[in-house]
Amino acid sequence: MSKELTHFIGGQHVQGTSGRFCDVTNPNTGEVTGRTPLASLSEMQAAVKVAANAFPDWAATNPQRRARVMFEFKRLLEDNMQELAEMLSAEHGKVIADSKGDVQRGLEVIEFACGIPHLMKGEFTEGAGPGIDMYSIRQPLGVVAGITPFNFPAMIPMWMFGVAIACGNTFICKPSEKDPSLPIRLAELFMEAGAPAGVLNVVNGDKEAVDAILTDPTIQAVSFVGSSNIAQYVYATGAAHGKRVQAMGGAKNHAIIMPDADMDQVVNDLIGAGYGSAGERCMAISVAVPVGEETADRLIEKLVPRVQALKVGPSTAADSDYGPVISKAHLDKVEGYIDLGVKEGAKLLVDGRGFKLQGYENGYFMGGSLFDHVTDDMKIYKDEIFGPVLSVVRAKTFEEAAELPTKHEYGNGVAIFTRDGDAARSFASRVQVGMVGINVPIPVPLAYHSFGGWKRSAFGDTNQHGTEGVKFWTKIKTVTSRWPSGGVKEGSSFVIPTMK
Ligand code: NAD
């Protein structure tokens, strides 16, 4: 049954009034399960007003009290984990265990945000000059916004609002229109945790809502995660309107496999990192680069039967390795890339096209696909495919392999598999990629470090969460104060103050 979804503004569910909607489907069945309202400019403006009204009191709430809301929210996330995972899985299509991982990764950012009293402590210099003290403080920015993709509907909103709100800002979240129910549920729980109305608002929408955010004079900062062309547009448009912007984009993550690597471990890791969540992760491994023909042959020999044996099934089944992709349009796009790869001359060793699951014939399922002999001039190598497709690019030498991720336009994640510490260390140091795994296939930094790619995988200069997140969501103010004993006696000085 299809249900009418809402926005969540000022602590309440609010019906959409624009008259524009977008269908939400269950990708397991293709059934339309809801209609997301798409906000107009005036609906967004109304939500921004609500967030602006909530800001002064929330910013003035002491950081320990703000942290207590975070503690309580964390507890509610834990208590409601099963319900949240089921809700997420029904709109996204990732399996329940992976959906729990999505919530858990967000929850870990909330755990980090519980430390906000410590994280926002400023710096103080006593006696910077005669009777002079100098201190730097971090203050919240005001109303801020986050625009999020479909593929992590729990984790990515929490990357953003967890830190932003703990810092004292009030927040507008504009989730993906493809799976909007989870962010709304998070906002309900956040209220239940004790957040005042208007501190966290969820406004659904498409480009019109995004443009309303980017041009609104009240909104001070925008965090975006999605595909690179839109990330670049958001970065440029937000900056042109005087906002602080961070915009994370797409990826093509390579795994370099050295001849000395433990091949059984490599294959286990590539199967999980390449095909988990149907390859719809910005940190999915989509390119494997074995070094030397012999390494490549050993890899292929072990990989092919594992890809053939992948258990593709409904996201609700405990034994499914991965579920459907997000939509019919995306399924067609990914299958189109496989057609293209064949045309480009890559060798298709396992073909996942045309996969039909009995009882789920209208679902958006796809078998795992594996290409060998992919080269760096092919479009299937250059583009982000974002599906259950792994490309093997054979490199003759370590140097040739190491150059590939550095030369690629994306620079989100990369991994190297080896027993050679020297090779791993040198690779990690020189590769032009933001997040590096050494024998770790998906090197997603923990919440107290920070997440961000390089090159076209991220626009802006500050990463998500960790201390970088605190920097992004606050501005620094430095106060110089003079309280000389006996009062100020000096006359006017026309020279810039120095410490000579
Ligand atoms: P997307 O770019 O289609 O959508 C992201 C957001 O932008 C959504 O909220 C959407 O409503 C909005 N949007 C869509 N079209 C727009 C337009 N023309 N103008 C303005 N806003 C628009 O991305 P997606 O398909 O939801 O997510 C998948 C992409 O996100 C992949 O490229 C993936 O690599 C990337 N991603 C990156 C990271 C990272 O941290 N680097 C993390 C997760 C996902």
Image (cartoon, rainbow, N blue to C red):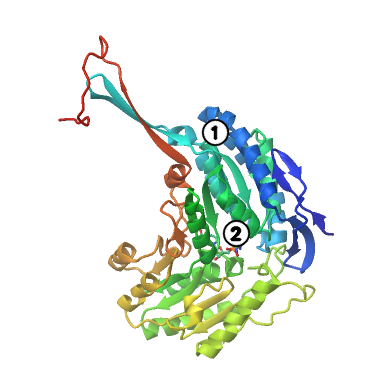
**Residue at the farthest right position:** 1
Q: Which residue is mark 2?
A: 149
In this rendering, would 362 be left or right of 424? right
Tag shown at residue 165: none
Tag shown at residue 67: 1
SS at circle 2: loop
Give the distance between the C-alpha atoms of the residues marked 1 and 2, in whole angstroms: 27 Å
Judging depth in this view, the residue of 277 and 137 nearest the camera is 137
Quadrant containing ligand 1? bottom right
- Badge 2 crowding class, 10 Å Cα cut-off, few under 14, some 14 to 19, many 20 or more, is many
Judging depth in this view, the residue of 176 and 163 nearest the camera is 176
In the rendered image, the vertical position of residue 364 relative to residue 318, given as above or below = below
Q: Classify mark 2 as within 8 Å of ligand 1 or not, answering yes or no.
A: yes
In this rendering, would 75 be left or right of 163? right
In the rendered image, the vertical position of residue 54 relative to residue 295, given as above or below = above
In this rendering, would 264 be left or right of 323? left
